[in-house]
Amino acid sequence: MKYRLGLAFLIMVLAMALAAGCSDGKQDAAIDGELQDGVYLVKGHIEHDSFGMASMEVIDGDISSFKYSEIIATTGEEKNEDNYSDNTEVLTVIEDLNEQFNKKKDIDEIDYDVITGCTKTKETFEELTNELLAKAEAGDTYRPFYKDGEYNAKADEDNYGWLGEVNIVIRDGQIVGVDYFEAAIRKLKSSKAILDEHGNPELDDDGNRKTESVDVEVGERKSIENYNYIELFDTIEAVQKLVINSNGVEYLDVDVVTGSTGSKDIMIELIETALKEAK
């Protein structure tokens, strides 16, 4: 009897060991830091009118492709020699970082000293790449939120001759470009604020802004050169950041954006309209 019980116990232990050996391995992979197959993507937050984005594909546990890029928030274009001629050094740094990682496939093996300058780009690259690797270890694969393409929406009515419009760029299922503007639909008489050397409006003796009359042609966009309420442009930039960082408008905390309430509401409404076509 004891022999039979001992044999049964041994068989049970062997069966458990075999079952463990035949498991899908996901738990072990997470513990061992192995990468799970799939496509992964992370997007950084906007800083100085642009942001970083990194994507990676893992096949059979190995990194088959990787790309880090920096994108201009208004146009949705990756930085290149045509649209970022003021600082072409960063383009060389991005190219080198991509080349190193695709070759070494190990973030700890990246030689940051071999390329000088562009400290922020290096920091963002390292941050996003580590985030990608963490997602790949956990098997947290990426699913696109929107259909790639360019989407547009216009306001139904103008506001004193200015009509709101937005262009949105979707790439890899992510909002990468938001360009909201208000353009003249007829010739207008307007005014611009006179700014000091620091870009602040100059005031007269009564505390009112000094302005200068300007003529606005059809199709001309509102700018500090033809519109005196310059706070509007801060509002547009703030909403743009929120939308790109949040990848949509569903969970926006618009209360953090002050001023230009009318334009802010129109901007969000038009973005919602444009994104309906992308879903």
Image (spheres, grey):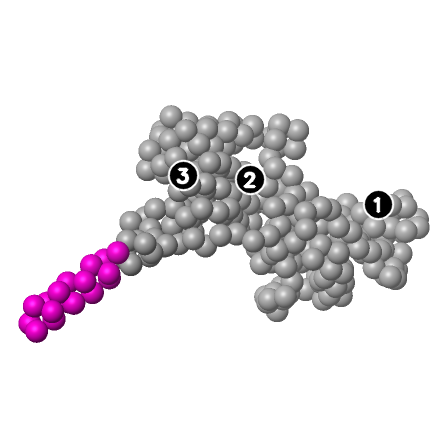
Which residue is found at the position 65% from the left and 54% from the top?
A: 146
Magenta residues: mostly which secondary structure? helix
- Residue occupying the far bottom of the picture: 1
Categorize mark 2 by other alpha carbons within 10 Å: few (<14), some (14-19), many (20+). Answer: many
Which residue is found at the position 54% from the left and 38% from the top?
A: 69
Categorize mark 3 by other alpha carbons within 10 Å: few (<14), some (14-19), many (20+). Answer: few
Secondary structure beneath label 2: strand
Q: Residue 204: where, in percent of width, then height?
A: 73, 56
Is tag 1's residue or tag 3's residue first in the polypeptide sequence? Answer: 3
Q: Mark 3 points at which residue?
A: 62
Left or right? Give the position of 242 relative to 26.
right
Spatial separation of the CA atoms under disc 3 and disc 2: 25 Å
Secondary structure beneath label 3: strand
Q: Mark 1 points at which residue?
A: 220
| Kind of residue sitting beneath label 2 | Glu
Q: Is residue 151 magenta?
A: no
Q: Name the residue under label 2.
A: 70
Q: Give the range drawn in magenta.
A: 1-18
